[in-house]
Image (cartoon, grey):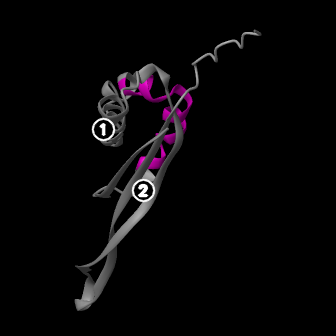
């Protein structure tokens, strides 16, 4: 079973979000919530909401315990770029970009169900 959460058009650059990815992937979804809750970084708050959304949908729709979930895919993609300009010296324009990002989370359930033994009759 796959549980998907896709959060679009976050007003933070993908580079800032990607700094937390390796740490979150190592510890798994349920433990990462406590790690992100106490982290003072802005990307931590964004990841907390995204992972919490995916876990809550797994609980309500598929009736899966959060301890049985693991990350199948956790990526940060580049969103749209807004082109803006700042006035510069001698009346020139200095261009810059306002970056946005998308977070894609796919969770899967670990297989802890034991298969029943076959009886020979």
Q: Is residue 47 above or below residue 87?
A: above
Q: Residues within 10 Å of mark 2 (few under 14, many from 20)?
A: many
* Residue located at (32% from left, 24% from top): 38
Element under disc 1: helix
Q: Is residue 2 above or below residue 75?
A: above
Q: Is the stretch drawn in magenta largely helix, strand or loop?
A: helix
**Label 1 belongs to which residue?**
53
| Residues at circles 2 and 1 in contact by the CB criterion of under 8 Å | no
Q: Residue furthest bottom?
A: 91
- In this rendering, would 98 be left or right of 77? left
Q: Which dot marks residue 14?
A: 2
Occupied quadrant, residue 42: top left
Of the pair 96 and 81, the residue shown nearer to us: 81
Counting from the top left corner in percent of width and height, residue 76 is at 45, 53
* Residue located at (35% from left, 43% from top): 43
Q: How many marks?
A: 2
* Residue located at (42% from left, 56% from top): 14
Q: Residues within 10 Å of mark 1 (few under 14, many from 20)?
A: some
Q: Residue furthest right?
A: 120
Quadrant in which the C terminus appears:
top right
Please provide the residue range marked out in magenta: 17-33
Of the pair 3 and 26, the residue shown nearer to us: 3
Sequence order check: which comes first, mark 2 or mark 1? Answer: 2
Counting from the top left corner in percent of width and height, residue 16 is at 41, 50
Whole-number angstrom distance, CA of label 2 to CA of label 1: 20 Å
* Residue located at (44% from left, 29% from top): 29
Of the pair 88 and 63, the residue shown nearer to us: 63
Q: Nearer the viewer, mark 2 or mark 1?
A: 1
Q: Which dot marks residue 34?
A: none
Occupied quadrant, residue 15: bottom left
Element under disc 2: helix
Counting from the top left corner in percent of width and height, residue 101 is at 37, 59
């Amino acid at each position: 079973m796959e549980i998907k959460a896709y959060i679009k058009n976050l007003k933070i650059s993908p580079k800032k979000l990607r700094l937390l990815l390796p740490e979150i992937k190592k510890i798994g979804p349920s433990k990462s919530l406590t790690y992100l809750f106490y982290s003072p970084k802005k990307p931590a708050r964004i990841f907390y909401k995204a992972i919490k959304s995916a876990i809550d949908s797994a609980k309500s729709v598929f009736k899966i315990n959060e301890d049985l979930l693991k990350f199948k895919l956790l990526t940060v993609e580049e969103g749209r770029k807004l082109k803006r300009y700042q006035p510069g010296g001698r009346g020139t324009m200095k261009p810059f970009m306002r970056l946005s990002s998308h977070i894609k989370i796919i969770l899967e359930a670990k297989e802890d169900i034991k298969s029943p033994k076959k009886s020979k009759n």
